[in-house]
């Protein structure tokens, strides 16, 4: 017994003629007639009375028809479920992000993922950029949004989201509130910067080394917001990205700081599951 035989039998019973059933199913009338007759032989029962102009169910046909329709409905449900499973992306993604990340497109994409792709299990991990980069390389994270200077480690792919110079962030009216500064102009100031292992700190230290300047940091913190609040209160000059200044503060360009701070999305070049590739593509599109 074949499922298409049951489908042909049910169509004839519903339509009342082999011709109408053939038209509905887009097959030949002779093909339907042959397959229904074969089904009857296999069951050992006549299912259809063909004596009149309209085909009628025999008592055996009346008993078999609801069972045939149930079997067809079950088959359709199985095929539908299998198709949904094939189309849906499932899996686990371990996503890293810099400590204190508050970038709206990044957070919006992460929040939407659970609604649009419920088959993906997402875990979030905060940390310093150097640590996140090491974890992606080691395979304990699949993706990470990190800050860095220069290039990422070999074996990683990076999509640069932000690439901008570092600046001296200080209160408006500060003695160093000028059109631009040099790294040596900061020697008499307390320097506020992000912690080691962050992209801003790496850009600052590399720029200082290139100019033969001591990359001194007097106060470090893991959050740019904390550094901005300290700079606003006169605790020192914050070295941050050029776009960081808030109300009452000014970001003065450091003209000789050659190394830019970058924010990028990194992943290993290999072993990316469909779920990882999907989230990576969504984040890349959102962050651009």
Image (cartoon, rainbow, N blue to C red):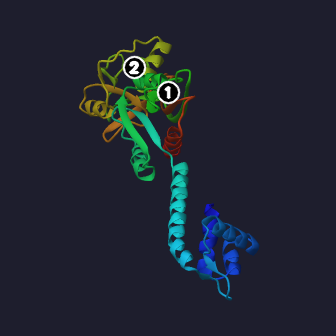
The structure residue drawn at horizontal position 54% and vertical position 40%, both measured from the top left corner, is 274
The structure residue drawn at horizontal position 42% and vertical position 31%, both measured from the top left corner, is 241
Disc 2 is placed on an element classified as helix
Q: Is residue 286 above or below residue 268?
A: below
Between residues 184 and 227, which one lies in front from this camera angle?
227
Question: Extreme bottom residue here?
Answer: 53
Residue 36 placement (x, y as % from top left): 67, 70
Residue 39 placement (x, y as % from top left): 64, 67
From the image, tell me which residue sits under label 1. 260
Crowding near the residue tagged with mark 1, few <14, some 14–19, many ≥20 C-alpha atoms within 10 Å: many
Answer whether residue 198 is visible to the viewer in this image.
no
Q: Would residue 66 be found to the left or right of residue 112 on screen? A: right
Question: Extreme front residue here?
Answer: 44
Q: Is residue 73 above or below residue 285?
A: below
Residue 59 placement (x, y as % from top left): 54, 79
Q: Quadrant of the N terminus?
A: bottom right
Q: Would residue 22 be found to the left or right of residue 47 on screen? A: right
Between residues 169 and 124, which one lies in front from this camera angle?
124
Q: Would residue 72 be found to the left or right of residue 208 on screen? A: right
Upstream in sequence: badge 1 or badge 2: 2
Q: Would residue 252 be found to the left or right of residue 231 on screen? A: right
The structure residue drawn at horizontal position 44% and vertical position 22%, both measured from the top left corner, is 134
Residue 14, by quadrant, is bottom right
Between residues 233 and 261, which one lies in front from this camera angle?
261
From the image, tell me which residue sits under label 2. 185
Disc 1 is placed on an element classified as loop
Whole-angstrom CA distance, mark 1 to mark 2, is 19 Å
Residue 215 placement (x, y as % from top left): 39, 15
């Amino acid at each position: 017994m074949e499922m298409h035989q049951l489908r042909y039998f049910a169509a004839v019973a519903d339509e009342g003629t082999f011709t109408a059933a053939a038209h509905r199913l887009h097959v030949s009338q002779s093909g339907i007639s042959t397959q229904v007759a074969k089904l009857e032989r296999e069951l050992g029962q006549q299912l259809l009375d063909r004596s009149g102009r309209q085909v009628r169910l025999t008592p055996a046909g009346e008993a078999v028809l609801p069972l045939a329709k149930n079997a067809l409905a079950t088959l359709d449900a199985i095929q539908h479920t299998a198709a949904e499973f094939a189309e849906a992306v499932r899996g686990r993604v371990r996503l890293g992000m810099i400590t204190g990340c508050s970038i709206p497109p990044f957070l919006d994409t992460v929040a939407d993922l659970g609604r649009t792709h419920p088959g993906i299990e997402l875990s979030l991990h905060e940390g310093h950029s150097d640590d996140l980069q090491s974890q992606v390389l080691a395979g304990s994270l699949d993706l990470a949004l990190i800050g860095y200077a220069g290039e990422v480690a070999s074996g990683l792919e990076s999509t640069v989201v932000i690439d901008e110079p570092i600046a001296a962030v200080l209160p408006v009216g500060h003695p160093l509130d000028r059109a631009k500064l040099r790294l040596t102009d900061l020697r008499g100031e307390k320097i506020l910067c992000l912690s080691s292992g962050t992209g801003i700190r790496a850009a600052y230290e590399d720029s200082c080394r290139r100019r033969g300047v001591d990359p001194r940091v007097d106060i470090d913190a893991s959050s740019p917001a904390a550094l901005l609040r300290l700079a606003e209160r006169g605790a020192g000059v914050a070295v941050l990205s050029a776009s960081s200044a808030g109300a009452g503060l000014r970001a003065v360009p450091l003209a000789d700081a050659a190394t830019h701070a970058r924010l990028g999305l990194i992943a290993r070049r290999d072993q990316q599951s469909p779920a990882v590739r999907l989230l990576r593509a969504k984040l890349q599109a959102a962050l651009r």
